[in-house]
Amino acid sequence: MLVLENIWYKDIIRNVSLTHSKGILAIIGPNGAGKTTLLKIIAGSIKPDKGVVKTPKRIGASWQNPYYSFYRSTVREEVELAYKIAGKKGDPLELLRAYGLERLADKSPYRISMGEARLLSIALTLIWDPDLVLLDEPTTGLDYFEKGKLASILWGLGKPVIIASHDLDFILRVSDYVAVMHKGEILVYDHVFNVFYSRILEKIGFPLPPAVLVGEALGRRIRCAEECLS
Amino acid sequence: MLKNVLASKHYVNPLVSMVYLVWSFYMIYSGMGFFVLVASIAISIYLGIARKLTILLLWVALPSFLILFLLYGLWDAAVTTLRIATIALAATTAFASPKPQHTAYMLYKIGVPPLIAYSHLYVYRFLQLLSYALSEAIDAAHGRGVRSRFKILMLLPIPLLVYTINTSTYLAEALYIKYPRREKTWVDKPGFRLVDILLVLYILTIFILYILGHDLLVLKLLTY
């Protein structure tokens, strides 16, 4: 279980408190809001100036630049290394197939596209079975199908995940809870639907995803029709 | 630390810092390291890098102290470690104190080819980028479940090397775009400020005291 109590770090994080134990939590906010810094504090790579951080021991993370996490000359060898690090046995090709990356098995991980590299980095992170998964901007460079693949993988994980992202459509699709960050503070931390319908996103300058707008319009029509019928 | 050097409003004239470096080594060689230590600490506080420098020094000094303590005993270990720390501190503050643009100007003026003077400026930028890349690569290794420091050390060179090669392409482009211009926007003429005058005065005072007063008790007491 993750517990953050009154975390302060320079001017970037201001009195942030957060608890998360189950499901997918998305941290959203504009650039410079402190999302990545908060993830780094959770991962333990940044020590906060003040506050209490209680985290599970095994924290897996995939950061903004996936290319930093590759060490081998082919994607297959990279997966083999990840299995070795995790002390597990597994078929690299089977894992790559699950992520739709089997065609890249013999390619260099540095020669694949950003989206593919990101998916691979997430796959490598999940191999060692961490207790908490941190994903920083996981959808950058991913196409529609890759996003769908990632969403289904995240749903099937069954362990707490924290995502920092701008991609509101993806967050609406996968997350259970949302924390809205603005200027280092958490403005709202609630269930995803409550946050999207609370209009807080509009207040900090985010356009609402089309799905939310359609949902609202449908809701209004249904209400209108009910009123007309009654 | 590099970030501090690049962005800081606190800096020393490159000529003065060079004189300070030469003086420091001469004084350390003559057993007058105490005065170098005082000057180095003062400069590092002025530059705002004292805290980070202390951590760096501990990394250098502690292992040396432990090895020397085991081999030669407490007193010799303490004196030698202090000397090592003084040399490291003096060299770091001397190189960190001038603004890169000022050093580029000095190099350019004394006849160093502009490309080298210009490249020197970029080395600062590149080192800053590399230190950022290093911390990102360490975070990525932790994220993949690599916990052992030795394993991280073995794995890190690969992503860092790839990063360096990739970034050098952008660097070369930047060099190509900026360098041929006649207007040298990458240099800045350094001036002499109060801090430079104070440093020169300190250097001269200690040097004259050392030359004239070998037998002064205060100097003898502070010799190491």
Image (spheres, coloured by chain):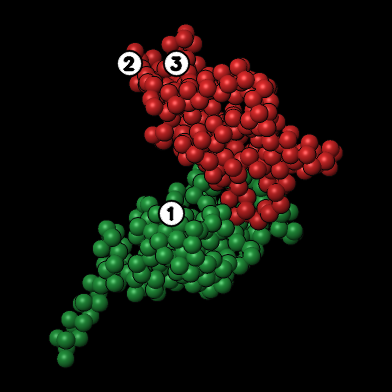
- A85 sits to left or right of A52: right
Residue beneath disc 1: A10
Residue pushed farthest bottom?
A: A230
Instruction: Determine which quarter of the picture holds residue B63.
Output: top right
Q: Which chain is red?
A: B
Disc 2 to disc 3, how far (Cα)?
Answer: 16 Å
For residue A176, above or below residue B32: below
Disc 3 to disc 1, how far (Cα)?
Answer: 37 Å
For residue B147, above or below residue B220: below
What kind of element bears circle 1? loop
N-terminal label among 2 and 3: 3
Q: Is residue B155 visible?
A: no
Residue beneath disc 3: B106
Task: Same chain for labels 2 and 3? Say yes or no.
Answer: yes
Q: How many C-alpha atoms fall within 10 Å of the one at disc 1: few (<14), some, or many (≥20)?
A: few
The residue at the point 65 percent across, 59 percent down is: A127
The quadrant in which the N terminus of chain A is found is bottom right
